[in-house]
Image (cartoon, rainbow, N blue to C red):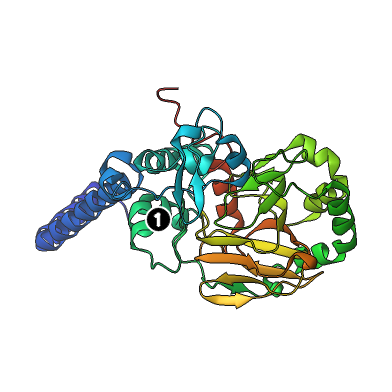
C-alpha cells in the first residue's frame, strides 16, 4: 500500500463514518465504564473510610470482660469500691486490666483505627475476615448464640466447637506433654500450700480468683500478653517450654500462661472467654477424681500428662468435687492460636491487640 495524502484522507473519512455508524454503541460503552468507575469509588470509600462505618461497627457495645486473676488481686486497691459480681466473678474496673477497661463502644472505634493504622503500615491483603470482624463487631457480639459469646472480639467464619482434637496443634501438644515431668517439678518448687482462709496473704507470685465456693489460685508467667518477670525467674524451665511453642499467643492481650490450682470443693462458675481466635490448652499436672471441665455443655475430664484443647469463648465451667484427702487439681494453662487463623491475620491481631495499644488515653 502506497502512503499518500489522498489515502490518509480516505482512511480518516472511513473511520469517521464508522464512528458515526456506531455512535450509539460507543456512547453506551462509555456510560457503562463511567458507572462502573463511580461504583468502584463508592465501594472503596465505604469499605475503608471510617465515618460511613461508624453506624455499623458501633451498632452495639462490647459485653464487659470478666476480671483476670492478676487484676483480681489488685481490685482491692483504689478500685475496690467499684467491684461488681457476675457469674461468680468480680469486675475489678482496674486501669491495668484490658478486659475491664476496654469494654464499650470506644473499644470498637479504637479497634477500627488500629486496623487502619496496621493496613497503612503493612497491607490490607489477607485482612478480609479481620476487617469484617472489626466492622461488624457490635452485631456479632450481641447476636451470638448464648452457648458461644466471646466478650471482646469475634473473628467471623472460624470453625467452632467446644473441644478440639490434639492433632490441630500437634507439635505444641506433644511438646507440652513431653515437658510434663519438668513442669510438674517446677510447680512443686513454687507451690506452698496456700492459706485456708481467703483473707490471708498468699505466697509470692500467686493470685486468688473469685469463686462462689472453694479456692482457685493462679501463678501467671504471662498475663494478657505481658510477662511477669519475677514469676518467670522462678520458673525458667516453664519459660523455656513457652519459647519452644509454635502457636503460643505471646504478643497480644489474649495470650496467657499459668499454673492453675483448684482446691477440693471449688467451683469456677459459667463464663465466656474474650475471643474465639485462640484455643486454651490445659496440661494436667495433678488430677484427682471428681474433677471436670464442661465447655458448651460437653463434659471432659483432665488426665495427668495429657492436654485438653478447648475454645473458651464457649460457655464453660470447672469444678473439683473431691475430698480434702484428694488434694488440689493442677493444670498448666497456655493460650494457643486457633488453627484456622492465618499467619497474616495473626500478625494483624498481634498489632491491634498489643498490650496497651487500645487503652483509652482520654481523661487519663
Where in the figure is residue 133, as x and y percent of width and height? 42, 55
Q: Is residue 279 above or below residue 363?
A: below
**Could you tell me if residue 286 is visible in this image?**
no
Where in the figure is residue 4, as x and y percent of width and height? 27, 49
Q: How many numbered discs?
A: 1
Other-residue count near label 1 (Cα within 10 Å), few / some / many at <14 / 14–19 / ≥20: some
**Could you tell me if residue 356 is visible in this image?**
yes
Q: Secondary structure at mark 1?
A: helix
Where in the figure is residue 138, as x and y percent of width and height? 34, 52
Q: What residue appears at the point 37 percent right and 40 percent down from the top-left corner?
A: 109
Q: Is residue 354 left or right of residue 228?
A: left
Q: Is residue 331 left or right of residue 363?
A: right
Q: Is residue 10 above or below residue 303?
A: above
Task: Name the one closer to the observer, 253 or 75.
Answer: 75
Q: Is residue 199 above or below residue 22?
A: above
Which residue reaches farthest top?
A: 364
Q: Is residue 358 left or right of residue 201?
A: left
Quadrant containing the C terminus is top left
Quarter of the figure with residue 328: bottom right
Task: Name the one closer to the observer, 314 or 29.
Answer: 314
> In the rendered image, which residue does mark 1 sit on?
132
Where in the figure is residue 303, as x and y percent of width and height? 76, 73
Q: Is residue 173 left or right of residue 71?
A: right
Task: Name the one closer to the observer, 182 or 21.
Answer: 182
Amino acid at each position: 500500500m502506497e502512503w499518500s495524502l489522498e489515502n490518509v484522507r480516505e482512511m480518516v473519512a472511513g473511520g469517521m463514518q464508522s464512528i458515526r455508524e456506531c455512535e450509539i454503541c460507543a456512547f453506551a460503552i462509555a456510560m457503562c465504564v463511567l458507572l462502573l468507575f463511580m461504583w468502584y469509588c463508592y465501594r472503596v470509600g465505604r469499605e475503608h473510610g471510617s465515618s460511613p462505618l461508624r453506624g455499623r461497627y458501633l451498632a452495639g457495645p462490647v459485653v464487659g470482660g470478666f476480671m483476670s486473676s492478676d487484676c483480681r488481686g489488685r481490685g482491692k486497691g483504689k478500685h475496690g469500691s467499684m467491684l461488681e459480681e457476675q457469674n461468680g466473678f468480680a469486675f475489678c474496673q482496674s486501669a491495668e486490666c484490658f478486659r475491664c477497661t476496654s469494654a464499650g463502644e470506644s473499644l470498637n472505634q479504637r479497634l477500627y483505627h488500629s486496623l487502619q493504622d496496621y493496613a497503612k503500615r503493612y497491607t490490607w491483603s489477607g485482612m478480609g475476615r479481620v476487617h469484617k470482624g472489626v466492622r461488624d463487631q457490635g452485631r456479632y457480639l450481641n447476636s451470638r448464640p448464648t452457648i458461644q459469646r466471646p466478650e471482646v472480639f469475634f473473628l467471623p467464619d472460624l470453625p467452632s466447637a467446644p473441644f478440639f482434637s490434639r492433632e490441630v496443634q500437634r507439635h505444641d501438644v506433644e511438646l507440652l506433654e513431653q515437658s510434663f515431668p519438668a513442669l510438674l517439678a517446677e510447680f512443686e518448687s513454687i507451690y506452698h500450700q496456700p492459706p485456708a482462709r481467703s483473707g490471708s496473704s498468699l505466697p509470692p507470685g500467686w493470685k486468688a480468683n473469685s469463686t462462689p465456693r472453694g479456692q482457685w489460685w493462679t501463678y501467671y508467667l504471662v498475663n494478657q500478653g505481658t510477662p511477669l518477670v519475677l514469676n518467670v525467674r522462678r520458673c525458667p524451665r516453664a519459660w523455656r517450654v513457652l519459647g519452644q511453642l509454635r502457636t503460643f499467643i505471646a504478643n497480644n492481650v489474649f495470650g496467657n500462661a499459668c499454673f492453675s490450682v483448684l482446691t477440693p470443693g471449688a467451683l469456677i462458675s459459667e463464663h465466656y472467654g474474650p475471643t474465639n481466635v485462640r484455643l486454651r490448652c490445659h496440661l494436667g499436672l495433678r488430677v484427682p477424681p471428681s474433677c471436670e471441665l464442661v465447655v458448651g455443655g460437653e463434659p471432659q475430664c483432665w488426665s495427668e500428662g495429657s492436654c485438653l484443647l478447648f475454645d473458651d469463648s464457649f460457655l464453660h465451667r470447672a469444678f473439683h468435687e473431691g475430698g480434702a484427702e484428694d488434694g488440689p487439681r493442677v493444670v498448666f494453662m497456655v493460650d494457643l492460636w486457633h488453627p484456622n487463623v492465618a499467619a497474616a491475620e495473626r500478625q494483624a491481631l498481634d498489632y491491634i491487640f498489643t498490650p496497651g495499644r487500645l487503652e483509652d488515653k482520654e481523661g487519663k
